[in-house]
Amino acid sequence: MTSAAELLAGIAELAGAEPITRVTIPARLEYAYSPGTAQTRFLNALREKRLLAERCPQCTRVYVPPRGACPTCGIATSEQLELPHTGTVTTFCIVNIAAKGLDVEVPYCYAYVLIDGAHVGLHARIGDTPYAEVRIGQRVEAVWRDELGPSLASISHFRPTGEPDADPESYRRWM
Amino acid sequence: MPPEVLSAPLIVEFPFTRSTGPVLGAFLTGLRERVVLGVRGSDGRVICPPAEYDPVTAEELTHLVPLGQLGTVTTWAWNASPRPYQPLDTPFAWVLVRLDGADTALLHALDAPRASVRTGMRVAVRWAEERTGAITDIACFVPVTDAATPTDAATSTETASAPGTDDAAPTEPEGPAV
């Protein structure tokens, strides 16, 4: 296998030129993202430290964040409700690679939190506790930022409440 | 009345770093030094941009040859509404240019009034002022008359009166694209 330098050596006007060996070519997609009416309600409520959800009129599952429809039944969700700020860890992972632009020290714990009364997990970071102590069934509560906005970033993270772990029967269907 | 629906910019970007390998590495190095390289295939044809492997035999190719900075448009398409990050921010033609000394054509942009663009027209490389070893080291192609030498076409102001080659005023007025 030859190198770029070897190939360049055979060309009078390029002999000795510092060869290019790597290039950075970003793949960049620019969207104008609109979350739709249901998520707009949810995001706006986060400004007031409220967690809005929707219940499917057919299967009665409660979705947070709401999408305006039940993905299981395929029908519009009409009933809106407000959920508490507490929940149960249903699964988690330890993140060891720092994502560009993310202002969190690695390693950290990222989890699904099943908010009390909901039937889908909310993605959230678990903080204020050693990551090695995070476990499935652990009870957690939302920690809100001082600056609230129409974004899930209004919730800084979830932290353990110190309550006993939840009964697995209470969340096993919704893992 | 439903609340106003939110909207926000969402940018997804993957900063891929790629190894360029011997042939494309040499090609990009050449661009930085204002030399366009092709590669000679087993059938004697010169391929530009250079292929790493022979299109006929699949053998590794290593015989690089410097090409001229003049070429011929083999086909083109008009771009009336350039998008961000495209080579020019005024309407231009996407062109396939067969550089003198090559047997295949290179895709690039041609800065010329739409009415003047045609298959077979003669064009020259306009180099970017700052070159880093990328295809964008060729800022674009510009029209030339065959009397001009490659050096003149690319750098001198003498040819600036030819349509579309005025470096100082690349956005010459023209009618709306038809």
Image: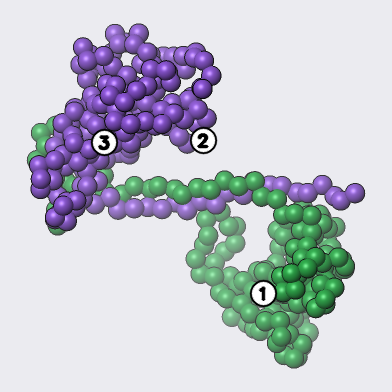
Chain colours: A green, B purple
Residue density around tag 1, few if under 14, some if 14–19, many if 20 or more, within 10 Å: many
Closer to viewer: mark 2 or mark 1: 2
Residue A128 visible, this orientation: no
Amino acid at circle 1 = Tyr
Disc nearer the start of the sequence (3/2): 2
Q: To which residue does mark 3 refer?
A: B105
Res B138 quadrant in image: top left
Tag 1 subunit:
A
For label 1, the residue is A112
Residue A64: % across, % down: 76, 68
| Numbered badge on residue B84 | 2
Q: Is residue B77 left or right of residue A83?
A: left
Helix, strand or loop at mark 3: loop
Circle 3 or circle 2, nearest the eye: 3
Percent x, y for residue A13? 14, 32
Label 1 – label 3 distance at C-alpha = 53 Å
The subunit letter for the residue under badge 3 reads: B
Q: Position of residue A154 (x, y in %)?
A: 74, 58
The residue closer to the viewer here, B76 or B20, is B76
Residue A165 falls in image quadrant: bottom right
- In this rendering, would A59 be left or right of A124? right
- Crowd around label 3: few <14 · some 14–19 · many ≥20 (10 Å): many
Foreground residue among A70 and A108: A70
Q: Which mark is residue B74?
A: none
The amino acid beneath tag 3 is: Ala
Marks 1 & 3 on one chain? no
Residue, x 52% and y 55% (percent of image)?
A: A100
Q: Residue at x 50, y 31 (%)?
A: B82
